[in-house]
Amino acid sequence: MVDLKAKPFNLDDKKIKWVEDTIRDMTMDEKIGQLFINLTLRRDEKTLDELVNKYHIGGVRWQGGTLEEVYEQNRFFQEKSKIPVLIAANCEAGGNGAVGEGTFVATGAACGASKTLDTVRDMAKVGAAEAKAVGCNWSFAPVCDVVSNWRNTIVNTRGFGNDPEAVAERSLAYMDEMTKAGIACAAKHFPGDGSEERDQHLVMGCNDLSVEEWDASFGMVYKKLIDVGLPSIMVGHIAQRAYTKKFNPDIKDEDIMPATMSPELLQGLLRGQLGFNGLIVTDATHMAGLTAAADRKNAMQKVVAAGCDMILFFNDPAEDIGYVRAGIEDGTISAERLDDALHRILGLKAHLGLDEMSFPNKDMLAVVGCDEHHALARKAADESITLVKDTQHILPVTPADKKKVVLYFVESAPVSLADGPDPAKALLVKELEKAGFEVRAPKDYYEYEMEGPSKFNRFKMMEHENREEFKKNTDLVLFVISMKGYAKENNTRLTYSVSHSCEIPWFVHEVPTVAVSLNYTNHLFDVPMMKTFINAYSGSAEYIEALVEKLTGKSEFKGEANDLVWCDRWDTRL
């Protein structure tokens, strides 16, 4: 059973009495409801009222909505709920993880490349202030995964890198800033992503490190966080075979479960060996990493029985609650396990002061997207943008010697053509022209389709220019990669918009070429012919502005790449 007087709760007798009295006065429906965190997509009063008064949810996370809509939604939850709710956001890169108008400061990869802890502290500080303004009290971060596999694109940009000591240092700095702001952290994704290349949205993950390897990396990171009072941990749908077998030597491989359903990992490793006394929350339960391991009924029961205290997201509220109730009635979920989970949930709420909760005043919304926060984003961009290599010694480039620039901008396929092109392309053209360059930015296939769908658009993308004319009219090619991927494929790589596309780098031996990634750090694997390569980490205005300043020599490159950028290849270093 949980010790509410110990870390991370540190409750006094008054707060413990609130926890005990609240649990004692709950109905069974209210107790079960506390285990669930709802993903709020609809904000009409009827839907919100049903969530708090029929399903008695214990926590919330949301997607979409304007700043004011999110504020009013969260205010409704807190004012109408009998028991205050935990309100969570994914503040992994700043305030943009809480609300669309929030400030993007830096990804985990940018924080890892920065040589100063100011970058991660500023990112956390901005995220905390903007999230708190809309009533958030829980951040599903830091992403403390140790990225050892360059093919991994799930936490490639979200994690702090491949050095466990640096990951621990930045995770601790992040947690320190959130704690000072009164927001609880949920470090993720235990037992650790980044050692393989698959996406748990699509398949059960497997952390296949040995016990000794895990102890020296993920184990060290989690232990440091736990020792200073980490309040909660998000558990991934990731199996850890070595430790599962250590705690259960007779288990068959076919019976090995993802951590969310593994008593060996939750009770033996996390609670026992690492001494974690806080709250355990599952990763999203619609992910195939969980659904591939069990049917919904068994999954809902086994995550709680194994040791998870809260379940992230309903599928169907009434059905999921019914599954948990059936598990309690048939003993799959013991009375002691339910009681323990409730004490941890209410204990975290008391720790955050929700027993005496007052919702933030609306005037606090002014901090969201404020000038001061965007100044910190500019500072983060300056500190993190990384010159990976320049073996042709071309930088800096200026309009004085390379005025005519052709920009090939290779972007991911938009979810919908109605979304329009990647805004980073127009931002980059604007900054280059402001710097004095003449810029020609050929359309890509998606832009042609946005102007008018046609089966001939793909043929336009296959047309190549006369080489001598191209060389006469071009001083520099800027080849920019803005690829993004999530819950769609297991390994996001550089993808051209059509086969035999004119975007494919035919020009590297015709005119000087500089390549830039605005997201993933592993694109050299697909374009090793690029002799100058920059990881810029974001296509936001601040990062685009800083990129052009560094290209033209007005600012030095300060970021530092780790060895994963070479993708275990010799040719990427040339």
Image (cartoon, rainbow, N blue to C red):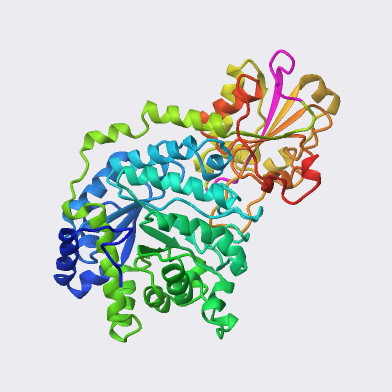
Given residues 373 and 217, the one toward you in this image is: 217
Find residue 68 and report its horizontal and vertical position in percent.
28, 40
Place residue 324 in its image quadrant.
Answer: bottom left
Q: Is residue 312 visible?
A: no
Which residue shows up at 52% across the image and 81% down it?
248
The residue at the far right in this view is 468
Q: How many marks?
A: 0
Q: Relative to residue 153, is residue 78 drawn left or right?
A: left
Find residue 472 and report its horizontal and vertical position in percent.
81, 20
Which residue shows up at 49% across the image and 59% down it?
189
Place residue 24 in its image quadrant.
Answer: bottom left
| 409 falls in the magenta region | yes
Find residue 465 and report its horizontal and vertical position in percent.
80, 30
Q: Relative to residue 48, is residue 131 drawn left or right?
A: right
**In the depicted structure, whether residue 194 falls above or below residue 305:** above
Magenta span: 394-415
Q: Can residue 295 be seen in this view?
A: yes
Q: Quadrant of the N terminus?
A: bottom left
**In the depicted structure, whether residue 368 falls above or below residue 39:** above
Find residue 144 and report its horizontal and vertical position in percent.
50, 53
Dominant secondary structure, magenta:
loop
Q: Relative to residue 550, is residue 117 drawn left or right?
A: left
Q: Quadrant of the C terminus?
A: top right
Q: Relative to residue 478, is residue 147 drawn left or right?
A: left
Which residue shows up at 24% across the image and 45% down it?
72
**In the depicted structure, whether residue 77 falls above or below residue 377:** below
Given residues 430 and 185, the one toward you in this image is: 185
